Amino acid sequence: MNLLWDPWHASPEAAVRRGQAARLQQFLRDTVLPFSARYQKIFRERGLTAEDIASPDDLAKLPFTSKADLISPPEQPDRFREFIVVPDEKVLARRPGTIWSALWRGRAAVKKRFEAEFRPVFMTFTTGRSAEPVPFLYTGQDLAVLAAAGKRVMEVCGARREDRLLNAFPYAPHLAFWLTHYAGTEFGAMMFSSGGGKVMGTDGTLRLIKKLRPDDLIGIPTFLYHVLSQAVAEKVRCENLRNIVLGGEKVSDGLREKLRELAAELGAPGVNVLATYGFTEAKMAFAECPFAAGRESAGYHLYPDLGIVEIVDPKTGEPVASGHPGEIVFTPLMARGTVVLRYRTGDCVDGGLTYEPCPYCGRTVPRLVGRISRSSEVKEMNLDKLKGTLVDFNELEHVLDDAPHVGAWQLELRKTNDDPLERDEIILHVQKIDGGDEKQLSRDLSERCYRIADVHPNKILFHDLGQMQELQGVGTQIKEQRLVDHRPKVK
Ligand SMILES: [Zn+2]
């Protein structure tokens, strides 16, 4: 079966939309409606059939699926199973295609093919801080799609087959690590996985860098920042480093600049610092193509043959026009295993979706342009209301990443005297870089936080790199922590 468009990145907009319409209808008719308990019910309740969804625009007839829909409530601990596509052998056996294949290739071959298509063999989990992790099941076909999507990340980032790649994502049942693993395998480059801070630590990762001198470094921004800072402190050289590819957290311009500067000190000026955007529910991630320092990113290059991205008004849920900001909604086109239609990510992109050819690489795929704010994380931690004001933590993160003389940082929430009924306190922990006066920097930071996010930190504390690593849990936490909530709960 031909799963992918070849080439995937060179069709004009009209052809992309036509191809997506055909795929969407086939996917609903042959896979989702016959075999997904959840969507059978939804279509039935609304009196819809696959024929009613004849184009990507018709998706608006379907309700969204949100994170809350996926979490199993105590009275229904297996809710995630409703989203798994479970084929009915009798239905498959009656299909003309099945009968033909059986005649041509034999029954055993047909059985094997269906197993590869439908039998779950792998899973990852969602990564929320407080919510119960939700399993996402993959079949053999899903793994093939994961590998293809991963290979495209490599292509878009401009990796080369002769490159050596260091995958520094935490070794965990999460998308980022496994996408990178399969990407390297499919792309055919030499790749080694360090397992991130918790498995090998900063020192171990640094030893690997010294020994293997990677061309491409892939991982979580906060962790890579620590590794490269330490590398600079130890006067390590890595002149052949070409790409730093980031995932798992959003990436601000300030952090990009700091990573570029660190790479330059390792003897690799002009490194590309590229972000990726992915989420468990999509079972894939999308990348930026290289662009010169000082230019704007062209955004995340989507795979129109593998999924449909809609941008909707976060308040009304109505689709918005191309180029308008809104929330990212995803529908897969080739998924098996766990299948979620119109998944509402909770992430907003401020430049929306564009179909214009990419100004840098020329690919004609749709792109997500501008800054992506992950609102979900903030909501999970109940941070949106703090000290009596609505705090925009997305803004605050950008303010701190962009601040001069600030390396790593962490925001800690406490209560005055650790009394749950007392007022909220924000403590900002900062690693000061390239000199500067602490008092002056404190004043600047406080002023910046107030101007952008309407909140003054109660205290600003300075630390060296080692202390910051300890605070952020480098080497002890799966993912380094930039926001910690130490407020005691009311009993
Ligand atoms: Zn591009």
Image: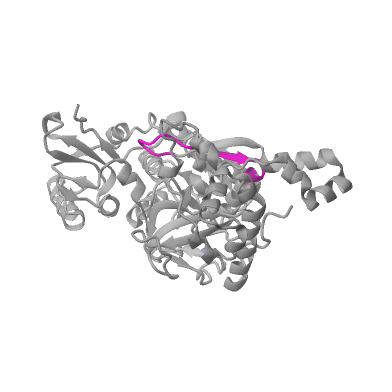
Q: Quadrant of residue 178?
A: top right
Query: Could you tell me how many numbered marks the image carries?
Result: 0
362 to 33, vertically: above or below: below
| Foreground pick, 374 / 397 | 374
**Relative to 193, residue 437 above or below:** below
Q: Is residue 466 left or right of residue 12?
A: left
In the picture as drawn, the residue positioned furthest to the top comes out as 491
Does any portion of residue 327 appear in the rendered image? yes
Residue 88's spot in the image, x, y percent? Answer: 69, 41
Nearest to the observer: residue 135 or residue 32 = 32
Observer-nearest residue: 186 or 317?
317
Q: Within the magenta stretch, is there residue 141? A: yes
For the record, the magenta segment spans 127-143
Task: Examine the structure image and report whether residue 380 is included in the region drawn in magenta.
Answer: no
Left/right of residue 117 with respect to residue 267 in the rendered view: right
With respect to residue 137, does 100 lie above or below?
below
Q: Quadrant of residue 365?
A: bottom right
Q: Quick check: 156 above or below 219?
A: below
Q: Residue at x 26, y 46 (%)?
A: 433
The colour scheme is one colour
User: Can residue 162 be seen in the rendering of this structure?
Assistant: no
> Residue 369's x, y, as percent?
43, 64
Residue at (68% x, 61% y) in the render:
6
- Residue 12: x, y in percent? 60, 72
